Image: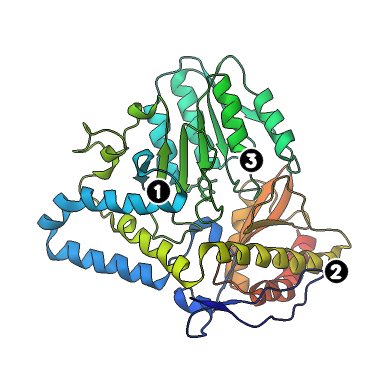
């Protein structure tokens, strides 16, 4: 079992700094990853980070693949089925409902390309959706000769208000609802279980974009009746990249086909997805190593609690650092907050406007050596913070002390 360091001090306002997580030998948790120690890493959420043991396992598997490709590929579907069971157990669901896909985008694409044609129908999305997934919904609507209806949900809407906004958006023409379990630009949750029930009462299928949920939420599929749920194991679960999961239930399941038609085509779901032709699928096979590493070292519940406590602290120190310049409150009231992803409001005009968040991300990395995410919603720019086991309070103190003054200068100069 890994452990925590003794309690640390803290420079924040009201929240005390959690003790950093340590490895069994007392080394910092970050030693289990290969992140560049000369950079700050405050954006686990966008692309994840893979522990050394899982990188090594993936490399071990690649060596086997390269040693005897003709032995490797025919045996692959059976080995994938085994890894699928691990992934399903981690997510608290049944492996018979669970297929591997390369990523959440691919899972959404599978759904979009497999649904029966809904001539002239409407697809309901929210204004918090992930742009690429929403664009896929728009393309599907064009193919159907239909439309996308975007429901606006206020950032601070709680579960009841969000549910009401979403269900009010359902019309007689709605043929699909696409909703995030954890949103990317706004770092909040939506009441996907209640929404799925309400949608099913109206006969409307639901696709839940849960890209961030695995590892971040303890039991993301509990009580969830959604027809389709797509999640990434390569974000908070730390699996090698290219490890997405599509969980599907209900009458539309037989319609689902992988993006790559291959020898599994005549198999039922999900076995059909275990056969993807000649592709390097070692990420899927090494994913259980990442899940087991975190569980065996600290336990996922401990890591989730740590990530959440650290995120509270991070918001505290960074929001206070901005307040010292602006005299304003930079904390953000999101209706259904989520453990390890948080927002801090930026001084205007930072991160507002098309592409501005990505430009700021690149500038902060280039000039200040910190990997961050900057988003915008309703004309306001945000720093979207992520935490993980390898982060420590010092990461966020450094950002508050070194980067916030520079951001304030950039805001004033804009
Ligand atoms: C909500 C959401 N959906 C989908 C994705 C896409 O994930 P991927 O690029 O792994 O397909 C992301 C990525 O950050 C996301 O945040």
Asked where in the image residue 394 lies, by quadrant, the reply is bottom right
Q: Is residue 223 left or right of residue 250?
A: right
Nearer-N-terminus badge (3/1): 1
Q: CA distance from mark 2 to mark 3?
A: 33 Å
Q: Secondary structure at mark 2?
A: helix
Whether ligand 1 has any atom under 8 Å from the Cβ at mark 1 is answered as no
Using the image as rendered, state which of residue 176 and residue 301 is in the foreground: 301
Asked where in the image residue 406 lies, by quadrant, the reply is bottom right
Q: Secondary structure at mark 3?
A: loop
Res. 243 in view: no
Q: CA distance from mark 3 to mark 1?
A: 22 Å
Residue at 70 percent across and 39 percent down: it is 159
Residue at label 1? 88
Q: Position of residue 5 (x, y in %)?
A: 61, 81
Instruction: Give the label on residue 269, or none.
Output: none
Q: CA distance from mark 1 to mark 2?
A: 47 Å
Whether ligand 1 has any atom under 8 Å from the Cβ at mark 2 is answered as no
Residue at label 2? 324
- Please rate how many residues cluster around mark 2, counting C-alpha atoms within 10 Å: few if below 14, some from 14 to 19, many from 20: few
Q: Is residue 251 left or right of residue 398?
A: left
């Amino acid at each position: 079992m890994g452990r925590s360091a003794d309690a640390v001090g803290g420079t924040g306002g009201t929240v005390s700094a959690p003790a950093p997580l340590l490895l069994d030998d007392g080394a910092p948790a970050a030693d289990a990853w290969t992140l560049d120690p000369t950079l700050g890493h405050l954006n686990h959420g966008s692309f994840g980070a893979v522990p050394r043991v899982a990188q090594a396992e993936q490399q071990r598997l690649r060596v086997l693949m390269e040693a005897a490709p003709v032995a490797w590929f025919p045996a692959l579907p059976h080995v994938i089925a085994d890894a699928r069971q691990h992934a399903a157990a981690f997510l608290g669901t049944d492996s018979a409902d669970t297929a591997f896909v390369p990523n959440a985008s691919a899972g959404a694409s599978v759904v979009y390309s497999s649904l029966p044609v809904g001539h002239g129908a409407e697809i309901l999305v929210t204004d918090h959706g992930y742009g690429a997934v929403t664009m896929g919904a728009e393309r599907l609507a064009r193919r159907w000769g239909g439309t996308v209806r975007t429901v606006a949900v206020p950032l601070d809407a709680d579960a009841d208000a969000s549910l009401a906004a979403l269900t009010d958006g359902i019309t007689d023409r709605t043929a699909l609802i696409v909703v995030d379990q954890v949103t990317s630009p706004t770092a909040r949750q939506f009441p996907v279980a209640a929404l799925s029930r309400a949608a099913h009462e109206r006969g409307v299928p639901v696709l839940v974009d849960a890209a961030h949920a695995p590892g971040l939420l303890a039991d993301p599929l509990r009580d969830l009746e959604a027809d389709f749920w797509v999640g990434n194991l390569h974000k908070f679960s730390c699996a090698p990249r290219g490890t997405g999961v599509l969980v599907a239930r209900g009458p539309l399941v037989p319609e689902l086909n992988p993006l790559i038609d291959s020898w599994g085509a005549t198999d039922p779901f999900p076995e059909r997805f275990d056969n993807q032709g000649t592709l390097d699928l070692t990420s899927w096979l090494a994913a259980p190593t990442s899940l087991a590493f975190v569980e065996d070292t600290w336990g996922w519940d401990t890591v989730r609690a740590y990530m959440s406590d650290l995120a509270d602290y991070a918001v505290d120190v960074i929001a206070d650092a901005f307040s010292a310049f602006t005299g304003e409150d930079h904390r953000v009231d999101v209706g259904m907050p989520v453990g390890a992803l948080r927002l801090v409001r930026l001084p205007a005009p930072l991160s507002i406007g098309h592409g501005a968040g990505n430009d700021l991300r690149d500038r902060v990395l280039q000039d200040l050596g910190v990997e961050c995410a900057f988003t915008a919603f309703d004309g306001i720019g945000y720093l979207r913070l992520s935490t993980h086991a390898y982060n420590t309070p010092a990461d966020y103190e450094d950002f508050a002390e070194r980067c916030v003054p520079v951001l304030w200068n950039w805001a004033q100069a804009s």
